[in-house]
């Protein structure tokens, strides 16, 4: 647990920490009185607080925007204040699937039972519906913003043999055009940004044993497809040049530079032969960990934490059908500066050996170094009582870094340094 706590330290830019993990559980599909529940998981001590209930039977998507949480359930969208856990707005909606916030607008993609108006746009503050997009030709899914445009995955209904992408104006949601990706785009679900491209994860249609990833140039809309001899489900995240996604009911990765499978199995199938599946998987780049929930959708739900090698490092409680996990990162730059005064390093700038001192230095501690974009580039520990106060940083590239120190009592402090 302590290694995970260290990873939730301050990021180098923006001074962010993981404030909490939100777990949205839909409950048992067979029990009409088992409603959607919302739970906050504290990353420091793993205590949990159930703070909300939505009286419907399934959850589609949860989204954090600054201090607010938006939850799309079966028949409603509900907004919560993440500081007080108070519900502050809600609206009725049929068939919501996924959400995206651009400026003051909340874009919502729509699926069954609706048969038209597959994008709806709301005021993110009040949840007042502002408009609908009538030109999108089928059920919609994931969305991504690129410049002043919103790209929307359009898989259509379960009978659709092709996938499409709709392009909207980010300022008002007005329709611009729709691109047909053909059969290779069938099942298009998640959209991600990678370098100068949009990457779409296309869920394998039922009965097919191969899957496709599409690469779309957002300027020209030229598209290339890569096919893989695996069943592909939804995407998880892109980290460095790897796309993490569900492959053959487990967690795997694809190298986006070579467009080849990197690891077909990082975490194996949790038990689909016995109707146990991953309900959702989220990736935290600071801890280099997957947070995942498994369920059979009617009798149990479990939470798991895996490292990049697929080793389970911890567990957490999760309700039945916990189909949406979302991280709540907060900016605490003022607090970080106050804490950093207790931790000092020298020389700074540094070339080889970095020496640190802390007013409450213990012989048992954890260290982590984060680069300028918040990626963990070093983890080390001293658990034998013979802790040293020096770190070899000669291998690091030139640039700014953050050193995080975590003592045996779980108190973390940080400071920045420049590597020459």
Image (cartoon, helix red, strand yellow):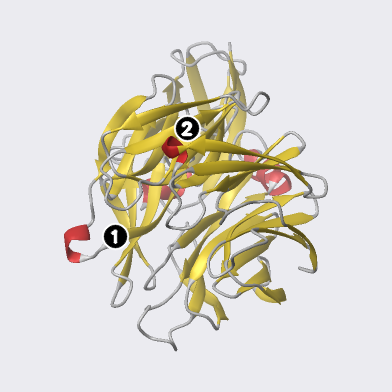
Instruction: Determine if residue 337 is in view.
Output: yes
**Residue 12, how many percent across, how many down?**
61, 33
First in residue order: circle 2 vs circle 1:
2
Instruction: Determine if residue 41 is in view.
Output: no
Direction left: furthest residue: 273
- Determine whether, in the image, residue 365 is placed left or right of residue 24: left
Circle 1 residue: 277
Direction bottom: furthest residue: 33
Residue name at image x 17 percent, y 65 percent: 274
- Determine whether, in the image, residue 154 is placed left or right of residue 147: left
**Badge 1: how crowded within 10 Å, few (<14), some, or many (20+)?**
many
Is 139 in front, or is 214?
139
Could you tell me which secondary element the residue under label 1 belongs to?
Answer: strand
**Vertical side of 56 occupied by 186: above or below:** above
Is 20 in front, or is 198?
198
Is 220 in front, or is 91?
220
**Residue 139, how many percent across, how many down?**
56, 57
The mark lying in front, picked from 2 and 1, is 2
Residue name at image x 62 percent, y 15 percent: 349
Circle 2 residue: 214
**Image quadrant for the C terminus?**
top right
């Amino acid at each position: 647990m302590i290694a995970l706590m260290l990873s939730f330290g301050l990021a180098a830019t923006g001074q962010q920490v993981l404030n909490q993990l939100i777990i949205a559980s839909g409950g048992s599909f067979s029990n009409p009185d088992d409603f959607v529940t919302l739970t906050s998981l504290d990353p420091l001590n793993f205590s949990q607080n159930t703070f909300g209930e939505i009286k419907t039977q399934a959850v589609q998507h949860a989204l954090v925007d600054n201090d607010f949480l938006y939850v799309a359930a079966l028949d409603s969208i509900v907004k919560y204040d993440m500081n007080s856990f108070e519900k502050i707005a809600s609206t009725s909606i049929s068939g919501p699937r996924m959400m995206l916030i651009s400026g003051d607008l909340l874009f919502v993609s729509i699926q069954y039972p609706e048969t038209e108006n597959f994008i709806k746009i709301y005021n993110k503050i009040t949840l007042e519906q502002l408009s609908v997009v009538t030109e999108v030709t089928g059920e919609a899914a994931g969305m991504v913003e690129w410049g002043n445009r919103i790209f929307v995955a359009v898989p259509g209904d379960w009978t659709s043999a092709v996938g499409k992408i709709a392009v909207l104006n980010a300022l008002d949601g007005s329709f611009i055009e729709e691109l047909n990706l053909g059969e290779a785009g069938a099942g298009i679900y998640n959209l991600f940004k990678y370098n100068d491209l949009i990457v779409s994860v296309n869920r394998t249609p039922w009965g097919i044993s191969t899957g496709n990833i599409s690469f779309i140039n957002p300027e020209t809309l030229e598209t290339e497809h890569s096919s893989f001899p695996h069943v592909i489900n939804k995407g998880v995240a892109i980290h460095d040049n790897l796309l993490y996604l569900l492959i053959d009911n487990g967690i795997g990765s694809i190298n986006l530079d070579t467009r080849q499978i990197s690891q077909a199995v990082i975490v194996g199938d949790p038990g689909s032969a016995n109707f146990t599946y991953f309900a959702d998987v989220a990736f935290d780049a600071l801890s280099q960990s997957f947070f995942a929930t498994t369920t059979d959708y009617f009798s149990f739900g479990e939470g798991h934490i895996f490292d990049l090698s697929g080793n389970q490092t911890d567990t957490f409680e999760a309700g039945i059908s916990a189909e949406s996990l979302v991280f709540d990162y907060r900016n605490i730059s003022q607090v970080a500066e106050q804490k950093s005064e207790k931790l000092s390093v020298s020389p700074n700038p540094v070339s080889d050996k970095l020496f640190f001192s802390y007013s409450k230095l213990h012989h048992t501690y954890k260290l982590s170094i984060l680069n300028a974009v918040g990626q963990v580039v070093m983890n080390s520990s001293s658990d034998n009582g013979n802790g040293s106060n020096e770190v070899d940083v000669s291998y690091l590239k030139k640039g700014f870094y953050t050193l995080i120190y975590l003592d045996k009592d779980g108190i973390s402090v940080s400071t920045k340094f420049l590597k020459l």
